Image (cartoon, grey):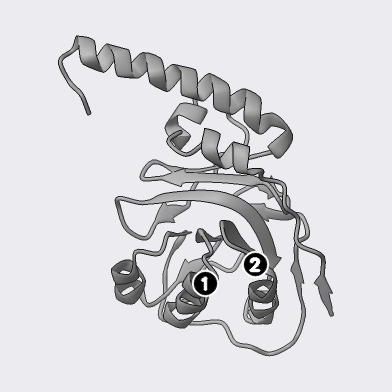
Amino acid sequence: MFRIQPRVQGVTPELLSLYRDISPSTIGHFTDFGFLKGLHPLFRPIRLLGNAVTVRIPHVDATAIRYAMELVQPNDVLVVDMSGDDHRACWGEFRTYAAIAKKVAGVIVSGCVTDVRAITKLGFPVYSKGISALTTRSLELEGEVNTTISICGVSVHPGDLIVGDDDGLFVVKPEDAKKIGLMALEKQQREDVRRQEYGCDT
């Protein structure tokens, strides 16, 4: 059975602008909640910022990802809960082509991905637990799109703000994002002043 819910636009243009240069490591000074521990970028340097579209698949069947790709819009981040499967890859080269065509901001997978060389060459932001040559199938068994999912012990809701860079990923609730973002931006501005004091402009 498939449960396909409408897409949620929780992230406003103002939030995207506010978080444009904010690092997850700065967010981590203000909250422990929302850090996706155990997920790693496929390559570095990397930057990911956008609106969560969530997917839940039952291990081997990745059909729901196809349904999610019909709903995504520019600046969305596809967040895939693989229901505990750490062995199979549900994302690869050709799904990446489709995501780029739709201007998706990036993909987060609570499992593995494949086609590393091609995705890296394309420069498409991907975070995962690992890499695998063993892949999922399209079996039309079941799945969910735009429901609350769990990634690394963190509840991810459709429309959440996703922030990622070389240091990792944070999921921020839209209702908390402005407050956290303003504190993070102020901290980074203070750090820029300190860098100048040390004679370092980068």
Which residue is denoted by mark 1 in the rendering?
A: 99
Residue at image coords 15%, 15%:
199
Q: Nearer the viewer, residue 136 or 189?
A: 189
Up-down: is 32 above or below 8? Answer: above
Placement of the N terminus among the 4 image quadrants: bottom right
Q: Nearer the viewer, residue 70 or 150?
A: 70
Q: Residues within 10 Å of mark 1 (few under 14, many from 20)?
A: many
Q: Is residue 96 visible?
A: yes
Choose top left, top right, bottom left or bottom right for residue 5. Answer: bottom right
Q: Nearer the viewer, residue 144 or 8?
A: 8
Which residue is denoted by mark 2 in the rendering?
A: 72
Residue at image coords 50%, 82%:
135
Per the image, label 2 sits on a secondary structure element best described as loop
Left or right: 157 as drawn, with respect to 62:
right
Per the image, label 1 sits on a secondary structure element best described as helix
Q: Residues within 10 Å of mark 2 (few under 14, many from 20)?
A: many
x then y, percent, for residue 143: 75, 74
| Tag 2: amino acid | Val
CB under 8 Å between discs 2 and 1: yes
